[in-house]
Each structure stands twice: as C-alpha cells, then as structure tokens.
Image: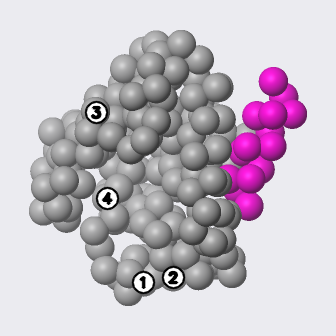
C-alpha cells in the first residue's frame, strides 16, 4: 500500500491530534532514515502506523492482542498505555497484511525500546519523541541532538521515559531498562 492509503486507514481511527502526530512521525522517520541510512519507505510506513491503536478502547486492544496469541507480562497487563504498541503491531499484521518483521517490531517497541533494536526500530522510537508537534520539556534540545547523534538521542529519550515513570511511581518495562543498559554498555 501507499502512504496515502495508510493515511486513509488511520484517519477515522484517530483523534485529530493523534492523526497529525502520526503524519509528523512518518515525516520525521523518513528524514531520520535518510540521515542515518535506513529504508525511508519502511520508516515512513512504520511511522504512519505506529499509533494506529492508540485511540482504540482498551478492551478492543486486548481482544486484538489475544487474537494474535500474545501473552502479556505482568507489567504489560498493569500498564494499559503499552497495549497500543503491542496491539498495533498485531493489528497491522493481521488486518493490513504487513509481514515485514522490521516494521512490525518498530511499531511493537516504539514505546519501550528494547535491547538489540534494529536501525528502523531506533528511528521510530526517537521519531516518536522528536516529531514536529512535540513540545515537552527538553523536546527542542532532543530534536537538535537527533540530527547529530542518533545513539545519544535514544539514550536521552530512554532517560526521559525512565525518569518520568519513576517520578510518577509507575512500573518501568524491562525492555526500556534493557535498551538503556545496552546503550551504556556498548558505547
């Protein structure tokens, strides 16, 4: 499918804000793919689809997860905000017929990251942080950093997530910690 077709699919599923965010992530992902040597079309596809389930009711997200035969960990069960990434990857595979594992993993791990991320996974993870509409404290600095150093930008994104979750006394997914540790150990 073409990007325009994916836009038509996600548009009715998302709020205006979330739709604009997906369009912006797709644009940022393409830019970063061109900058760092990944496949721009795959990056754009993963970017436009990464939040396809974000505005879907948790019950429907869980239904898609169960239909795909995915077993949630205790942390995943307790953190509904992670479900959209898991159900999103399952949805685009089952309903849209996307079988490219790199795209599926980029969607699946865009919220947590993980150890052993592919270049595409890294790009979608950080494109989600640095898309045009993002304006959290530190967003402008992170947008500048990603233009110079992908690894350092991902580390900063992971630090932001870990600090935020710990500060709010929320569980931290082991994949986020594994991604953080891997970057530090292999720098």
Gap between marks 1 and 4 measured at Cα: 15 Å
Q: Does the stretch in magenta take in 81?
A: no
| Residue identified by numbered label 3 | 132
Query: Which image quarter holds the C terminus?
Result: top right
Q: Nearer the viewer, residue 155 or 8?
A: 155
SS of the residue at dot 4?
loop
Task: For the residues labelled 1 and 2, say whether their Cβ atoms are less than 8 Å apart.
Answer: yes
Above or below — where is 102 with respect to 75?
above
Above or below — where is 127 with respect to 84?
above
Q: Nearer the viewer, mark 1 or mark 3?
A: 3
Q: Name which of mark 3 and mark 4 comes first in the sequence.
A: 4
Query: Which image quarter holds the N terminus?
Result: top left
Please give the range of residues in magenta.
Answer: 174-187
| Residue identified by numbered label 2 | 66
Gap between marks 3 and 4 measured at Cα: 18 Å
| Residue identified by numbered label 1 | 63
In the displayed orientation, state which residue is furthest to the right.
185
């Amino acid at each position: 499918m073409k990007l325009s077709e994916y836009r038509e699919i996600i548009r009715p599923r998302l709020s205006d804000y979330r739709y604009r965010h997906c369009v912006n992530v797709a644009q940022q992902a393409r830019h970063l793919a061109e900058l760092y040597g990944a496949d721009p079309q795959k990056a754009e596809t993963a970017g436009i689809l990464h939040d396809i389930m974000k505005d879907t009711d948790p019950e429907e997200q869980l239904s898609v997860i169960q239909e795909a035969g995915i077993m949630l960990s205790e942390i995943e069960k307790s953190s509904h905000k992670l479900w959209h990434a898991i159900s999103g990857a399952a949805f685009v595979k089952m309903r849209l017929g996307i079988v490219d594992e790199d795209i599926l993993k980029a969607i699946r791990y865009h919220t947590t990251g993980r150890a052993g991320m592919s270049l595409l996974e890294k790009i979608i993870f950080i494109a989600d942080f640095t898309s045009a509409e993002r304006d959290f404290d530190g967003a402008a600095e992170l947008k500048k950093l990603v233009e110079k150093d992908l690894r350092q930008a991902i580390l900063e994104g992971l630090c932001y997530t870990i600090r935020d979750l710990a500060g709010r006394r929320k569980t931290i997914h082991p994949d986020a910690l594994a991604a953080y540790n891997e970057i530090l150990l292999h720098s």
